[in-house]
Image: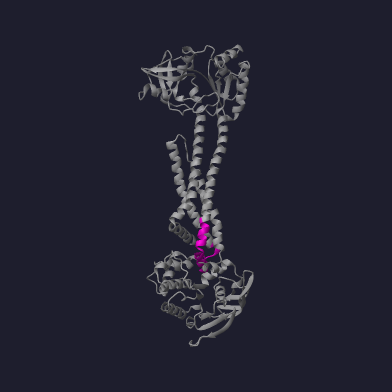
Amino acid sequence: MLIEIRNLSKKYVMDDVVVDALKTIDLKIEQNEYVAIMGPSGSGKSTLMNIIGCLDTPTSGNFLFRDVDVSSLDDDTLSVMRNKEIGFVFQNFNLLARMSSIHNVELPLIYAGIHKAERRERALKAMDRVGLGDRINHKPSELSGGQRQRVAIARALVTNPGILLADEPTGALDSKTGDEIMELFNKLHQEGNTIILITHEQEIANHAHRTIFIKDGLIHSDKANLKTKDIQ
Amino acid sequence: MQYEENIRVALAGLTDHKFRSFLTMLGIIFGVASVISMLSIGEGAKRQAIAKYQDLGVNNIIIRDKQFTDQELEEVRAKFSQGLSITDAQVIKEVVPGVKRVAPQAEINTDVKYTDKSSKSTIIGITPDYIKMLNFQTDKGVFINEDHYKRNLKVCVLGAGVAKTLFQQQNAVGKMVKVDDQWLEVIGVLKSKAVFTETVGELASRDLNTDIYVPLTTFLNRFSQENVLASQVQQITVQVESSEKLMEIADLIRGILIRHHFNNVDYSLVIPYELLKQEEKERQIYNFLLGAIAAISLVVGGIGIMNIMLATVMERTREIGIRRAIGAKKSDIMSQFVTEAVAISITGGIIGVILGVSLSLTISLFTDVTTFIRPYSVFIAFGFSVLVGISFGYLPAKNAANLKPIDSIRYE
């Protein structure tokens, strides 16, 4: 089992008021699944994404990643988890503006302690996979939105993570470019990657093979998408 | 590998905001430059003092005849004291243990002439031991030796200043000069010596380069003091075997002299070594103060770095969040920002060293203040600036590392 969430809850304290962002969540995600997590804003889907992305820890319950309980890990180990197992793709790309795209893609490998020659080779390969092999020395400001998102995807892929975690990946793109990005995700899924999409657009969620709907901190529904032929 | 990245990011940060980086560095630049130039001024003064006392001889005790008015002199003579004499010198040599050499000297001030040129000068009658005790070196010819002394020869050695006034570029050796009403043959010329600008005890400040040296025997036979009551010799220089016993020996000499002079203190003792040590102690405090003031400006420079780094961390919150999300540990962020602070302080330190060194060279070139840069002062100033960078970069770096990745990645 890649991800197993048991009886998980998350509380925030905001201005002396306790907010139950997630109440009791039980969830399993297998290797090579393509999952969309949907829900209106304030539903807790971002909180769930933060926990799955090892950016945050739950208040109670367990989050097991490859049978390792992440909720008990310290900050440094969480950093290593994010580095090795999580590939983030953000709505607003979150690239470092002053660096060339290839350097942006290399960055996770720098923190993984991989030396220069191998780093460059792997980054080039990742850029090729997203179809930007000829744009490696461009800075993000010299690229279109779709190209920036591709660089961000290359950065997420470069460490061969356990999951690609995409938070509204098409939110800042026009629909045509958005479709291209979604096609890239489909391709990456076919190549064997596990993908978790966080979105509030049904159309985007339809690309996934399974949709989990969250509302008020609880899983409202969890079902296979109709157009999917066969899962598992 | 992270170091390489850290340095890259730090240098990129410096060059992206050149003017801001320069302003931030300014504090460090001035701090380092002032530490170096202050220390070099202190060191220059110290070396000058040491050179001065070395000229007087650090193993010497100088007994100087006191300067009296005619009336005072009559009173002292009436109380049976004959003033400093060759006998005093002989007694000290024979009685006091640990004394190596004793050299009496007699002096008069008079004019010395060569052709149509004339120079005001101090004629000093000395014994051949004299040159062995003082840091004198001949430029041309020889100094007065045993032979000149024993045979009362009418020879003289000129100070560099006198030689220059009388002979300009000519070689003075072998020429005859007229001193008072006596003709003397020049047998040597001394190398130029530092001008004595301070009065040390009874040793009045004067230009040693205007002195003319003659054998004491010749002096006593040929020249006479203006005042018949004047002492036979004006100075006795005593060289001891080691400087450790200087004070003991000085006390012994005081005891002998007071008896021989019938309780008249018509002389005074100058101990260059003691004066040197005393002056060094005073100067140490002074140098320390100079350095401390300069160091304060370095600390102020450090606060400047901290200020700008804190602003930088705010400005780059999202960058920090992104780096954390893709796997940077707290320690990676920490070292990234410390590296930036250190890069600023090292660059500032290097510019500061260049500025400080050129400043102290300029000072000694265009003023009469002597400066001397010791390598250690450059290292201290530079090392201190790096230290300032690390310590004042620490807090902003810690702030950066402790930012929560979830919050900072959404920071606008």
Residue at x-position 46% and y-position 60% = B9
- Horizontal relation, residue A117 to residue A21: left or right: left
Residue B96 on image: x %, y %: 60, 22
Task: Confirm whether the magenta stretch covers residue B340.
Answer: no
Residue B157 on image: x %, y %: 43, 21
Above or below: residue B334 compared with residue A58:
above
Above or below: residue B81 compared with residue B296:
above
Residue at x-position 51% and y-position 41% = B39
The kind of secondary structure the magenta stretch mainly shows is helix
Residue B55 on image: x %, y %: 50, 28
The magenta region covers B308-331
Task: Confirm whether the magenta stretch covers residue B325.
Answer: yes
* Residue toward you, A189 or B317: B317
Above or below: residue B10 compared with residue B297:
below
Residue A112 visible somewhere in the drawing: no
Residue B42 visible somewhere in the drawing: yes
Question: Hey, which quadrant is residue A154 in on the image?
Answer: bottom left
Above or below: residue A206 compared with residue B121:
below
Residue at x-position 50% and y-position 48% = B382
* Residue toward you, B142 or B181: B181
